[in-house]
Amino acid sequence: MRKAGPRIRVTAQLIAAADGTHLWSERYDREMSDIFALQDEVAQAIAGALEVRLAADRRQHTPTLSAYEAYLRGRHHLLRLTPESWARARKCLDEAIKLDPAFAPAHASLGWGYFLIGANAMSLWPPWSR
């Protein structure tokens, strides 16, 4: 920031912390009477620059068809909440994870299954059942 009489100059930059590369910069020259409007404008510009950068880095994993089918079978059995359906669900979800280890929904559903076991006082888990 620099001030000269009734004017102010603000230079804003975004630098990647990992490697120091320059991502974005902008210079703003305004009257001091507009300082709050300038603050809003700079904040909005930075948020916009970050949004574009973050959206570009977003990656989406596409699972293999066989892993997705096993996942869907597992989800179907998981929601039935019986000891037999939990055994089938776990087998299907384990298969989905084996077929595509990077398929996060299969991992999440398996974790959800274990949560359901705990929430149901472990009545679906063999060592504690019967």
Image: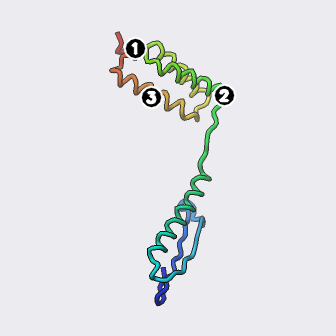
Counting residues from the start of the chain, the first of labels 2 and 3 encountered is 2
Question: Could you classify mark 2 by the number of other residues whose Cα lies within 10 Å: few (under 14), some (14-19), or many (20 or more)?
Answer: few
Task: Count the marks.
Answer: 3
Q: Secondary structure at mark 3?
A: helix
Counting residues from the start of the chain, the first of labels 3 and 1 encountered is 3
Quadrant location of the C terminus in the rendered image: top left
Foreground of the two, 88 or 127: 88
Q: How much space separates mark 2 and mark 1, taking CA atoms?
A: 31 Å
**Residue 42 on image: x %, y %:** 51, 70
Q: How much space separates mark 2 and mark 3, taking CA atoms?
A: 22 Å
Q: How much space separates mark 3 and mark 1, taking CA atoms?
A: 17 Å
Residue type at mark 1: give it: Pro
**Residue 73 on image: x %, y %:** 57, 21
Query: What residue is shown at x 48% (from left), y 88% (from top)?
Result: 4
Left or right side of 24 for 42: left
Residue tagged by mark 1? 126
Residue type at mark 2: give it: Leu
Query: What residue is shown at x 58% (from left), y 32% (from top)?
Result: 101
Residue tagged by mark 2? 65
Counting residues from the start of the chain, the first of labels 2 and 1 encountered is 2
Residue type at mark 3: give it: Trp
Foreground of the two, 28 or 53: 28
Q: Secondary structure at mark 1?
A: helix
Task: Determine whether label 2 and label 1 are within 8 Å by CB.
Answer: no
Q: Which mark is residue 116?
A: none
User: Is the residue 34 above or below the residue 121 in the image?
Assistant: below
Q: Which mark is residue 112?
A: 3
Q: Secondary structure at mark 2?
A: helix
Foreground of the two, 92 or 42: 42
Instruction: Indicate which label's residue lies in the foreground, 3 or 1.
Output: 3
